[in-house]
């Protein structure tokens, strides 16, 4: 994916508070914008459609964008919300970023409510730094969609449930792939709380498994295509316990056949299952999933599933080089020298 460097251009600088109509302001943007959010709770369901929008909170823990939609809730169109309409914040604009804030789906009973997305990103390039993402199930959706779901939600099947713009086209379709970077973020959840098809890098992030009444939890649920070299790359991350039972959480399970996850120099809490990986119920995805790990440090002994591969030092170095290349692409696009 080739992205031109960001040129000098008009830039809107906005300082907003919880009393402002954030969505109305987002919809009115005609230039790249930096939006500073004052402390407080922003009770709003937001969709960032414009390119080059940077949203920066005053305080990571007390600047909170908050909503509570859930999959089994009835939508105004008479159908259930389904997973992909439950987001608190959706980003489809290219080259957008979040920094120093929390995005929260405040529904607290995923077992009854179903999926509860906090952040949905469907854009060619996206960056988040020092951001907390909080929910229980399906916290972070890293688009694009798997091909079969594009067909389903575009109304190209015999099932009428998803006709008539069930998901808006600019949330469903995306040209090319997506590169997403999450730096020093904290992501909370229990079941499949990072899922999708993006090439996504998680650098020094904390992946925090919260308490749940279900028997098992799963951090990542990738659905990458076989042609993708990189899927989810977790680099120097901490898989931490936020209440999950000991040995109850798997690092990943493949949402589609060729889902890809690499875990490089990560630390694992006692809540992580010794096998590390689950094949997803009665599927044969243990034959096709591309899961690998290297230099893991675990509180408890691990015995990785035999279909999870050990990364060589050279492969780990290559993953880090690809991550640096992604960061270079972001800095070139954003015009930063971080």
Image (cartoon, helix red, strand yellow):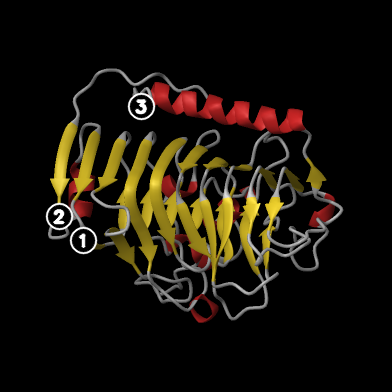
Q: Quadrant of residue 198?
A: top right
Q: CA distance from mark 3 to mark 1?
A: 27 Å
Q: In the rendered image, which residue does mark 2 sit on?
A: 17
Q: Nearer the viewer, mark 2 or mark 1?
A: 1
- Do we see residue 317 in this rendering? yes
x, y (%) of residue 133?
A: 42, 57
Judge by depth and name the residue closer to the eye, 181 or 77.
181
x, y (%) of residue 231?
A: 64, 41
Q: CA distance from mark 3 to mark 2?
A: 25 Å
Residue 272 falls left or right of residue 45: right
Q: Residue at x 42, y 38 (%)?
A: 127
Q: Residue at x 48, y 76 (%)?
A: 72
- Do we see residue 165 in this rendering? no
x, y (%) of residue 228?
A: 67, 36
Residue 284 falls left or right of residue 17: right
Q: Residue at x 33, y 35 (%)?
A: 51
SS for callout 3: helix
Circles 2 and 1: CB atoms closer than 8 Å: yes
Judge by depth and name the residue closer to the eye, 24 or 221.
221
Q: In the rendered image, which residue does mark 3 sit on?
A: 334
Q: Label 1 crowding class (10 Å Cα cut-off): few <14, some 14-19, many 20+? A: some
SS for callout 1: strand
Q: CA distance from mark 2 to mark 1?
A: 7 Å
Q: Residue at x 35, y 27 (%)?
A: 334
Q: In the rendered image, which residue does mark 1 sit on?
A: 40
């Amino acid at each position: 994916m080739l992205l031109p460097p960001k040129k000098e251009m008009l830039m809107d600088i906005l300082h907003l508070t919880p009393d402002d109509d954030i969505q109305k302001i987002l919809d009115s943007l005609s230039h790249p914008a930096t939006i500073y959010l004052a402390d407080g709770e922003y009770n709003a369901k937001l969709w960032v459609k414009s390119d080059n929008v940077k949203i920066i909170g005053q305080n990571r823990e007390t600047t909170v964008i908050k909503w509570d939609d859930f999959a089994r809730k009835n939508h105004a169109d008479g159908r259930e919300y389904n997973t992909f309409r439950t987001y608190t914040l959706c980003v489809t604009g290219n080259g957008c970023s979040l920094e120093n804030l929390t995005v929260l789906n405040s529904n607290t009973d995923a077992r009854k409510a179903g999926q509860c997305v906090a952040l949905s990103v469907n854009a060619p390039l996206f960056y988040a730094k020092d951001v907390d993402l909080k929910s229980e199930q399906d916290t972070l959706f890293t688009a694009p969609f798997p091909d079969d779901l594009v067909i389903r939600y575009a109304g190209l099947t015999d099932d009428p449930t998803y006709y008539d713009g069930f998901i808006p086209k600019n949330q469903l379709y995306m040209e090319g792939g997506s590169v997403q970077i999450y730096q020093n973020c904290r992501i909370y959840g229990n079941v499949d709380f990072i899922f999708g098809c993006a090439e996504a890098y998680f650098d020094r992030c904390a992946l925090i498994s919260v308490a749940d009444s279900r028997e098992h939890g799963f951090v990542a649920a990738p659905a990458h295509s076989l042609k993708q070299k990189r899927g989810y790359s977790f680099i120097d991350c901490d898989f931490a316990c936020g209440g999950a039972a000991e040995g109850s959480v798997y690092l990943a399970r493949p949402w589609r056949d060729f889902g890809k996850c690499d875990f490089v120099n990560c630390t694992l809490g006692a809540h992580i299952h010794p096998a590390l990986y689950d094949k997803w119920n009665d599927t044969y995805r243990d034959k096709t999933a591309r899961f690998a790990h290297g230099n893991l440090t675990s509180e408890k002994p691990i015995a990785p599933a035999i279909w999870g591969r050990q990364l060589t030092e050279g492969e780990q170095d290559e993953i880090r080089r690809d991550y640096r290349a992604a960061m270079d692409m972001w800095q070139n696009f954003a015009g930063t020298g971080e």
